[in-house]
Amino acid sequence: MTRCNSRLRALPSSVVLIAVAALGLLRPSPAGAQSATVAALKAAFLYNFARFAEWPPEAVRAGQKLVLCVANDPRVAGALKNTVNGRVIDGHELTVTSIALNDPLESCHLAYLAGIDRNEMRRLIASLRGAPILSVGDADNFAESGGVAQFFVEGDRMRFAINLKSADRARLRLSSKLLALARITKDNHDRH
């Protein structure tokens, strides 16, 4: 289990709800306020990553479904299915697929790769290099290692980092609304 995941489980539900409400990701309700979970929060983030991203035209053709893949985290996959149920982004129906880490990722538009170790992270990021896939992870240094987005905990809040060069390599355009909420990071080799 990664350090990030264990710290996320320890977050009070009120912190999770505040983070979600502040981002305008979910509409809080009195009943839902008690049941906010880390999986639901991550699902809301992933849905909004898809909402505020634009893929190159050849990656998402007219009428094609937008495929959101989740590896190694059935709770997030279930929460994401509930979050996107019946939703459409720019005319594309959303679908969620649970995948194994060794499955091919070409059919994914967004791939959330949970709980991976450093070697697996390097392998997966190398396999995605240049592919029009919005890669998201929760491993330490995921974005700095070439992933597009990374979940992390700061204080009591879940946040996310975005690697703009990785997004450019994937030919993704990310909305300024999304970038305004992100910590912008660079590839490890770009640091001085």
Image (cartoon, rainbow, N blue to C red):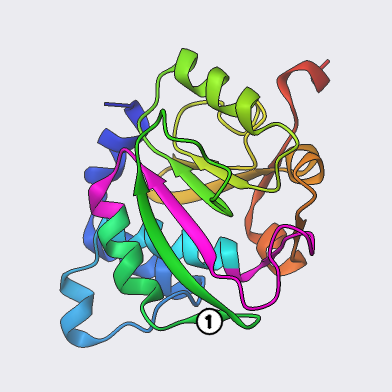
The residues colored magenta run 51-76
Vertical position of residue 46 compared to residue 105: above or below: below
84 vs 67, left or right, is left
Q: Tell which of 35 and 55 is nearer to you.
A: 55
Q: Tell which of 103 and 124 is nearer to you.
A: 103
Q: Residue 28: within the magenta?
A: no
Vertical position of residue 86 compared to residue 123: above or below: below
Mark 1 surroundings: few (<14), some (14-19) or many (≥20) residues within 10 A: some
Which quadrant is the C terminus positioned in?
top right
Which residue, given by chain and number where applicable, does mark 1 sit on?
88
Q: Quadrant of residue 34?
A: bottom left
Q: Tell which of 9 and 172 is nearer to you.
A: 172
Q: Which element type, helix, strand or loop, lies under badge 1?
A: strand
**Residue at 65% in and 28% down:** 144
66 vs 78, left or right, is right
Q: Quadrant of residue 71?
A: top left
Q: Residue 53: within the magenta?
A: yes
Q: Amino acid at mark 1?
A: Val
Q: Quadrant of residue 113?
A: top left
Evaluate whether residue 150 shows in this view.
Answer: no
